[in-house]
Amino acid sequence: MSQTFRIRKGFDVVIGGAPKQNIGTAQSVRSISLLGTDYPGLTLRPQLKPGAVVAVGEAVLVDRHSAVVVPSPVNGVVRAVTRGPHRSVEVVTIDITGASTRASQFGSSGIAALRELLHRSGLWTAFRTRPFGVIPKADSTPDAVLVTAMDTSPLAVDPAAALKGMEDDLARGVDAMGALTEGPVFVCQGPGPPLVASIRPNTRTVCFDGPHPAGLPSTHIHHLAPVGDGRVVWHIGWQEVAAIGRLLSTGELVNERVVAIGGPGAREPRLVRTVIGANLDDLMRNEVGEGPCRVVSGSPLHGREGSWLGRFDTQISVLDAARPESGLPFLSRLLGIRPRAPAPVIPLPDLARAEVAGVPAVPLLRALSIGDAETAASLGCLALAEEDMALLSYLCVSGADYAAMLRTVLDDLALDA
Amino acid sequence: MNVNAPPERPDSAGLAGNGLRPTVQIRSGWTVDRVSLAFLAAVLPSLAVAIFADGGSGLVRLLGVALAFTLGWQVLFGFTRGSPVGWDSVVTAITMSLLLPLSASLWQLALATTVGVVLGELIFGGRGRSFLNPAVVGLAFFSFSFPAEMATASAALDPWPALLGAVMLLLFRVISWRILLGGYAGLILASWVAGSLDADLILSAPVAFGMVFLAADPVCAASTNPSRWIYGLLIGVLAVLFGSGAVGVIFAILLASVFAPLLDQIAVRLMPHLRRRAPWLS
């Protein structure tokens, strides 16, 4: 018997081009990229130089402080390694030379060596912590693990449809989550029949019903295992859990994910199965309709425009090319007056509907926009991650990017913690 | 961290500085100026009815002078301080001229609009950065500086176009129904306790106009749902205490706006308890 939480607050942003929930064929991809920003909390060092031949499953990036690695999802040749600030790795691009995206060198080691297996296979990087929303330290233990098997973002994948053929893997993976924590494991899903059939004693299936942000991990954590007083909770996406299940049962590392292609500019909105980090120019060949548009990796509410599919993005949104307007008042534009300060927050009543994890919206936005980490923390921002700011950024008249502001504040707080 | 550094703006590089980090890709379309435009559209019926009932000349003169000063100060601050120049100055001029006495002389008008716009808004950085509504500040200044004039007749306001304006603003989702409901609840409650409850009070045009266009202005109102109730109640009760004419309502709103940040603070402190005990309130 599963428990159901009805989420009253929030709202669904309606965008045309909702994907048909069955898996179609994807365009072939000739190169992939691993992006440094997909791995918050790790200090990555490249293992290979441009021109090096890399086999699927071979470590491309390694964490400086632990045994956690990021393996190559394909057989190929390293084309480029781009560095960012402080010699961080920004992008590693690999040209694909072989068809296989499955690595079998990990062996079925069983639950006992699970942690070590997750570090070696790179699947450890699929976990995110609350507080701080980063990849957990290699030797840490959570107070609870949440498996996110739902998505209320616009144009998202419906796990019930995409799961076909992966049910056993998912069940196996959920089982394995119990070995990582002394506390409970929650499978958070939308309304409907349970996605995971056999469930161990300390594992529970929980339904969340309601508009976005009902499907966000922060909402689930807020209701099931709120952080604070030193409690740490991990969450992980269902496809990653299925990959862990497959790795445990067959020793095979699966580097493909089901991704939704949608949005007003998508020619045939549907689900496809493609490789991690796929080049979007290749993948979206013949997928984009007439007229100017932009391809976003991720949801319209939380995504990035660019040439590569993010490591943990499960959707590609094709949006109108027109960018949001600058919001400069008409008379200012007429007189040629450029405002010297960013636009202010106007506390429109709808902002209260967009709040996540019970953090009051307007006080949070005000604290974030002046970088006041102390107030933001007292309001409860440690229960949040970047994606939770999406609805607020969407609604707020200031046009500010609150996700980036929250990241700055969380990084500040992490230094003190 | 450097608090003075302006936060990264999405319109500078399109992707908030670092294009590799995910962020929001679509916007609701509401900007500061469009909120002002919504208020302008909502206040126009009240203005049209007042001009029609008035025969024109007196109110148009008030409006012309108020508009010249609100816009003039905004443009001056725009050029010297870089604050935005938007439709809000027009809304301020209209709301002020509808509540000011028709007999006000030019210099009195000039002084009141100047104090309202400059001290109530522009010195804080413009619309959205102050904690008071400039029209309320100007009107309050006028009524304690020139109480004899304030007692004379103002434009012929009607509650029904204000109601239409309220419906428009609620449909645009720029004002909170909690403030309006709380305000009228406070009004009815306080006048019932005082034994002065009657239909005239409920249908009073300055009260309705003030509630919709001044009290419910999101910039100067409380900004969390529980504190919006208290803020509304406070205005209703104070309006009865101060005498529910235009002056009473204006001072009630002024005082409640001053207390709004405190009400927000208290609401945020109590929020965890409220969520558990009274989820319907938040």
Image: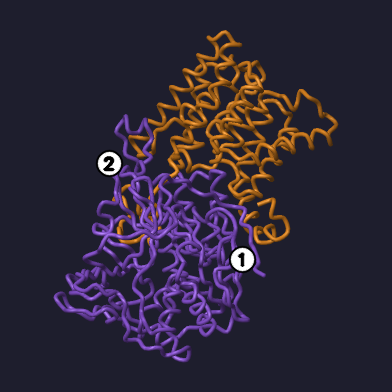
Q: Where B149 sits versus A39, above or below?
A: above
Q: Nearer the viewer, mark 1 or mark 2?
A: 2
Please, which chain is the residue tagged with disc 1 on? A
Q: Nearer the viewer, residue A102 or A381?
A: A102
- Residue indicated by mark 2: A291
Q: Earlier in the sequence, mark 1 or mark 2?
A: 1
Please give the letter of the chain rendered in orange: B
Q: How is the image coloured?
A: by chain
Q: Tally the numbered discs.
A: 2
The residue under the point 45% across, 67% down is A410
Q: Nearer the viewer, residue A60 or B37?
A: A60
The residue under the point 56% across, 65% down is A220
Numbered disc 1: secondary structure: helix
- Residue indicated by mark 1: A223
Q: Label 2 sits on what residue type?
A: Gly
Query: Viewed as shown, does residue B19 lie left or right of A136?
Result: left
Q: In which quadrant will I find the N terminus of chain B?
A: bottom left
The residue under the point 67% across, 31% down is B249
Colour given to chain A in the rendered image: purple
Q: Label 1 sits on what residue type?
A: His
The answer as to whether the residues below labels 1 and 2 share one chain is: yes
Q: Position of residue B103 (x, y in %)?
A: 59, 14
